[in-house]
Image: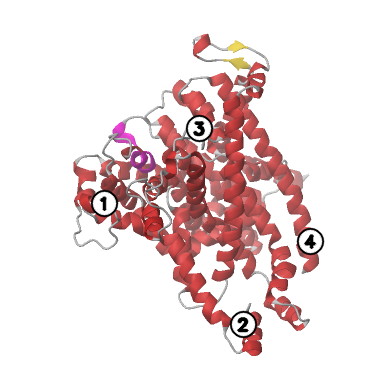
């Protein structure tokens, strides 16, 4: 594209790139950011401004009432804790189960390895709506309804394929000499993995951990189906159900506040780990 | 003989390390799918007092004359085709922009990630507010532009509701495609463009002759991922319209969910799950065939 620039410049004397690029960048930023900013604005407007026609874009009054009401009228703090607990636990399980499996699929000679790998690849495409009925039966049979295990185990499972694929590609990039010399020093596979390889792949663990955490925080259908107790609800379900609280007067302000508070941890993750997330996403999909 | 012992130990270690992951995945993936196949040949609903009664393929037969099923399949097709197509076009555009060198590129890339990271269900609530018939910002903008006099009931009109959920989905998932394609773009050598332009090609010709063929593997992979997700879309539609108005945005997964959870028709719900599963498997098979060809093609261009 750099060539395109020099060509158009040399022919007409107009630097087209200097014109279209800022416009394109601005459009991208507006398109992706506007809905979120609109929620932020709604969440700090007073009720009269929220329901004003024509719409108030630059309010003169601001309020944090909607945020406060989430905690005084509803157990929003609990929702956040629930989401955090479920997401962190399933992320840890996912890494603990996924990393060793990824190592085996990257390095060891194992009969049936190709088949397992193919299954892992295909399974990444299975949507959760195909699974909830069978899982519901298991949850009922084992009395796990309204138990966080009913979310933690499925969240671990649905994130394992991506974890395995990403971790596998990281293990493959490690120099093989290292493992050979560790084995000469008398390490067995478990010690090798635990003491040498996992510390070295810490960046990869962080990358896959973030992807798992985000996916677990956002999951909806299992949380909707297996958890009915109000105090155990997670952010997506709790926020979605705020809207149905009253038929005639929908609490737009608190809903907007809830979308902002409930997504804040994810926005922070994106801000701090942007590079790692992109790296993990592309590694997972491209290797597949 | 000694090698044999080493290999046997390696096998054993391998399986031990794989076991936890395999067990969890068997329970959560294999059991529900196999169970759906099994249940789909039984009738188990309120009519049988939730007892399982073997009924052969009657659940599948019922599907043929079930207008609501065909409607939901059509809705799913419309939703999936339009959203994935729009996302692909926009995704390529965003990727081309992000591939340029400009100041603040890192920040723009971070902003691109935000819709992808946010919970679909939560943003579904936000989009319902944006499309609100009385106070929604979309109606306000259209009114200010003089395009409409009174507010449109976006989520109350069958066609407009479909457009609204598609737009919300495009917003949410274009980043995914854009970032995958960006990674692909960054791996294409600039020399190729230089050589091509020396031959007198315009940027548009280069785009079709170099960018598209070399990007094809990434395009197919991202479309495949997006197809599978869009075809089973649940949370966004459940939150924004609940499948309404009058079933106009009811996709197959919404229909499956209410068949099971509202009508407690487990047998028929299982048959619906099986059919959706098979459609996805066929799509994956076709896509992997295309992918093999595109990779060979891309290798040829390089």
Asked if residue A21 can be seen in this view, the reply is: yes
Residue at which label 2 appears: A5
In the depicted structure, whether residue B293 falls above or below residue A13: above
Q: Residue furthest right?
A: B300
Q: Position of residue B245 (x, y in %)?
A: 46, 35
Residue at 48 percent of width and 20 percent of height: B264
Circle 2 SS class? helix
Kindly state the secondary structure of the residue where label 1 is placed: helix
Q: Which mark is residue A59?
A: none
Disc 4 target residue: B297
| The magenta segment | A230-240
Q: Which residue is mark 1?
A: A50
Magenta includes A233? yes
Q: Position of residue A256 (x, y in %)?
A: 31, 49
Foreground disc of the pair 1, 4: 1
Read off the chain for label 2: A
């Amino acid at each position: 594209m750099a060539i395109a620039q020099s060509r158009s410049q040399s022919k007409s004397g107009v630097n087209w790139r200097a014109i279209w690029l800022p416009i394109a960048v601005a459009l991208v930023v507006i398109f992706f950011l506007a809905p979120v900013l609109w929620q932020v604005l709604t969440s700090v407007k007073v009720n009269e401004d929220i329901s004003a026609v024509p719409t108030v874009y630059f309010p003169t009054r601001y309020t944090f009432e909607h945020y406060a009401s989430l905690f005084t009228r509803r157990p929003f703090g609990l929702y956040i804790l629930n989401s955090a607990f479920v997401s962190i636990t399933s992320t840890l399980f996912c890494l603990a189960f996924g990393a060793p499996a990824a190592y085996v699929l990257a390095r060891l000679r194992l009969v049936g390895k190709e088949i397992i790998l193919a299954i892992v690849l295909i399974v990444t495409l299975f949507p959760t709506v195909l699974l909830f009925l069978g899982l519901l039966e298991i949850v009922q049979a084992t009395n796990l309804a309204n138990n966080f295990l009913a979310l933690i185990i499925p969240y671990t499972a649905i994130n394992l394929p991506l974890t395995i694929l990403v971790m596998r590609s990281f293990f493959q990039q490690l120099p093989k000499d290292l493992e050979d010399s560790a084995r000469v020093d008398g390490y067995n596979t478990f010690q090798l993995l635990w003491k040498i390889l996992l510390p070295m792949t810490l960046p990869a663990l962080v990358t896959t951990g973030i992807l798992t955490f985000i996916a677990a925080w956002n999951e909806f259908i299992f949380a909707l189906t297996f958890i009915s107790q109000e105090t155990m609800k997670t952010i997506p379900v709790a926020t979605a159900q705020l809207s149905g609280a009253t038929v005639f007067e929908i609490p737009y302000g608190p809903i907007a506040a809830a979308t902002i508070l409930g997504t804040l941890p994810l926005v922070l993750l994106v801000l701090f780990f942007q590079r790692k997330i992109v790296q993990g996403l592309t590694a997972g999909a491209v290797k597949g | 003989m000694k090698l044999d012992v080493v290999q046997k130990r390696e096998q054993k270690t391998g399986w031990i390390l794989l076991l936890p992951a395999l067990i969890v995945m068997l329970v959560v993936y294999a059991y529900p799918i196999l169970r759906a196949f099994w249940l789909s040949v039984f009738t188990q609903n309120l009519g049988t007092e939730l007892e399982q009664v073997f009924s052969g393929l009657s659940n599948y037969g019922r599907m043929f004359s079930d207008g609501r099923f065909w409607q939901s399949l059509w809705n799913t097709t419309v939703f999936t085709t339009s959203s994935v197509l729009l996302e692909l076009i926009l995704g390529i555009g965003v990727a081309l922009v992000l591939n340029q060198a400009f100041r603040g590129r890192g920040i723009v890339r971070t902003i691109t990630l935000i819709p992808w990271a946010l919970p679909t269900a939560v943003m579904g609530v936000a989009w319902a507010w944006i499309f609100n018939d009385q106070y929604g910002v979309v109606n306000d903008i259209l009114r200010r532009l003089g395009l409409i006099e009174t507010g449109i009931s976006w989520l109350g009109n069958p066609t407009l509701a479909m457009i609204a959920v598609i737009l919300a989905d495009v917003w949410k998932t274009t980043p995914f495609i854009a970032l995958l394609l960006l990674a692909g773009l960054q791996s294409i050598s600039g020399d190729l463009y230089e050589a091509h332009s020396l031959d007198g090609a315009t940027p548009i010709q280069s785009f079709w002759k170099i960018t598209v063929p070399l990007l094809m593997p990434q395009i197919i992979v991202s479309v495949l991922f997006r197809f599978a997700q869009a075809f089973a879309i649940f949370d966004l539609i459940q939150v924004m319209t609940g499948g309404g108005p009058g079933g106009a945005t009811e996709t197959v997964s919404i229909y499956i969910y209410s068949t099971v959870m509202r009508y407690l028709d487990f047998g028929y719900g299982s048959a619906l799950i099986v059919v959706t599963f098979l459609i996805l498997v066929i799509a994956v098979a076709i896509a992997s065939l295309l992918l093999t060809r595109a990779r060979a093609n891309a290798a040829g261009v390089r």
